[in-house]
Image (cartoon, rainbow, N blue to C red):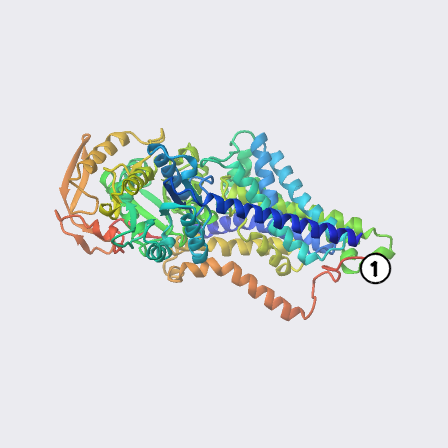
Amino acid sequence: MKKFLSILLAVLLIAVSLVCFASCGNESENEGGEGKFKVGVIHIGDPADGSGYSYTHDLGIVEMQKNLNLADDQIIRKLNIADDDESAIREAIEACISEGCKIIFTTSYGYMDTTEALAKEHPNVIFSHGTGYKSNETNFNNYFGRIYQARYLSGIAAGLKTKTNKIGYVAAYGTELAETCSGINAFALGVQSVNPDAEVYVKSLNSWFDPANETAYAEALIELGCDVIAQHCDTANPQIAAQTKGVFGCGYNSDMTKDAPKAHLTASIWNWGVYYTAATKAAMDGTWAEFGNYYGSLADGLVDVSALSENCAENTAEYIKLVKDLFKEGTWDVFSGVKLSFKDGALVKTDADLKDNAGKVIVAAGGASVEDSVITGTMNYFVEGVSLK
Amino acid sequence: MNTIIKFLFYSIRMGVPLLFGTTGEIVSEKSGSLNLGVEGLMAMGAIGGYYFGCKTNSMIVALLAAFLCAALGGLVYSFLTITFQANQNVTGLTLTIFGVGVYEFIGRSLTSGGKYPVMDEASQMVFMKSDIGIPVLRDIPYIGTLLFSYNIMVYISVLVAVVLWIYITKTKTGLKLRATGENYGAADACGVNVSFYRYMHTVCGAGITGLGGLYLGVVINGGAWNESWINGMGWISVALVIFAKWNPAKAIFGSFLFGALTVLQSWKGNLKEAFPDVLGWVDVIPNEFYQMLPFVITFIVLVVSSIRDKGRGEQPTCCGINYYREER
């Protein structure tokens, strides 16, 4: 019996290795598809999961594919590439290159350094890194957007909805990252535009992905008296917790009304397709040299708020539209010395100091916006009315 | 006062999956099966209960399915270790990898385009998902919140632990079970069917563990699939068995204590808010410390208990050793 088993095992092993070799052969045959323009995408997760980050990025890729009439085999996706595993990132990107990709999007912050190194090694391939700040003059840029503008709008929805004047915010990080910090500040300023008395309570997860704690943080905030829960983290768990507890919430990344239909107001969302289409087109047309770094805004259509749910308070749609128009005009920005408020359904601009939560003046009344500190990553304070819990 | 009560409330809620895991593992180890696959069993129970619960939109079916799916994992384990005499540690570890794999495989195939199956709050689901508690009693100040305002799973978990404690310590079958774990040779000589007892209790223990997995999925994560529902809770359960000295009654206390350690991270701000003078310092400690706290305490418990007990201590003597009758 033992002998039979070992023979069987040996035969199986040989068979398996043969199959492996065979498939290797197939891969190298495919390599030569040089005629077609190929696009590589490195995802940190699996777009099929949940409402989160990779899902929204992949929606953008799909939109780009449709806009530019690319065939399915012209998009090469590498999924579940941990962004702290340098060798895995390198392997995935190099696989894209060997499969003939001419432009490669690396979608997570942690891919930055590896992408930079590979851009140096492969000058003929274009590298585009999301949410980071590094770039070079020729074949490596970064892309991100003014999601804080969308957060300001969702803040309006939250500020109109709250009864307790306490709004919770489950954030991945606090002031240590300008991305989260600017989002919280813009949200709070949006809240204050319609509800000057409301306070924003922030709890920082210290992680981009920690589903069980995302629920627990939301619950703890609700116990502090918050009746609207906003979030800057990956899963819809804070929204679901809000629904279970009978309060409301503002999601992030994708429209989370489907996750928490009774609680969700509106989410700040990305339309990455706008960027992916523009960048891929530039790479195809050979106009990449002029493309540079990308920092899209609401006016570009890169960021927006999702369709307002029926949970939203009265006037939400009107007020959000007024501010949206202002963003599109480009005459005003969130982090400036001009405060917005509403009177009789009309927008009122007043000059006022923008202060941090220790009372220090960041922008004097009437002063210009400090949005640069969002882009360069130097914003590291909470505005008045925000407190870390 | 209110904050303290609420903190305890959430600690107990968070301790429930640990309690299921710990009591399940205690039953299994009492029979002599050192099943290290708790993490995998929880995962299997979670995904099984979730899948069938969503299909039928019924809490009862979800509970049964969670129990049965994890029990199936326990059956595989029993079959390998009891019938085939495979090494218990290795089989348990393999079961962890297998169970989590099954969970991810099924979970991923259920979710697509950002959508996943949902259990409606219709029918009885609301008993599990929201903290309904016991009417009237829950309105008593303080005590009502602390004792009578949980979802049904909390009461089930405590009930299971108490029943098992009575079963193990007070009944005749419990005595035979303990004999199987302490000295299988003697038990066999007394006419106890060792294999049958091990099979029974390993499978049932696994099933109870699976309920913890379902709780993590449906209550802690709100029923939205993601790849880290279990996230190490199974491993903490294994350590809690030692902490509880193989006693389901002590496991209740131990699980809720570890629940508190887990909840502390999200509640430190609330505690500081309520007691700024006494607990002002909880905020100064970095978040990373709270994140590692349950695991560090687990580590300390294991070290301290193994030093203090010098050798096997309270652990059933034959736990981890396969029974091969012909070698007796």
Q: Quadrant of the C terminus of chain B?
A: bottom right
Q: Nearer the viewer, residue A131 or A200?
A: A131
Is A180 situated left or right of A234 in this image? left
Q: Nearer the viewer, residue B81 or A251?
A: B81
Looking at numbered disc 1 in the image, what kind of residue is underneath it? Gly
Q: Secondary structure at mark 1?
A: helix
Is residue A19 shown above or below B288? above
Q: Which residue is mark 1?
A: B185
Q: Position of residue B94 (x, y in %)?
A: 64, 53
Residue at (36, 34) in percent of width and height: A63
Residue at horizontal 55 percent and vertical 38 percent from the top: B128
**Residue displayed at 31% across by 31% down:** A313
The residue nearer to you, when weighing B25 against A324, is: A324
Across and down, in percent, residue B188 comes to 85, 55
Q: Is residue B131 visible?
A: yes
**Chain holding disc 1:** B
Q: Is residue A373 above or below residue A301?
A: below
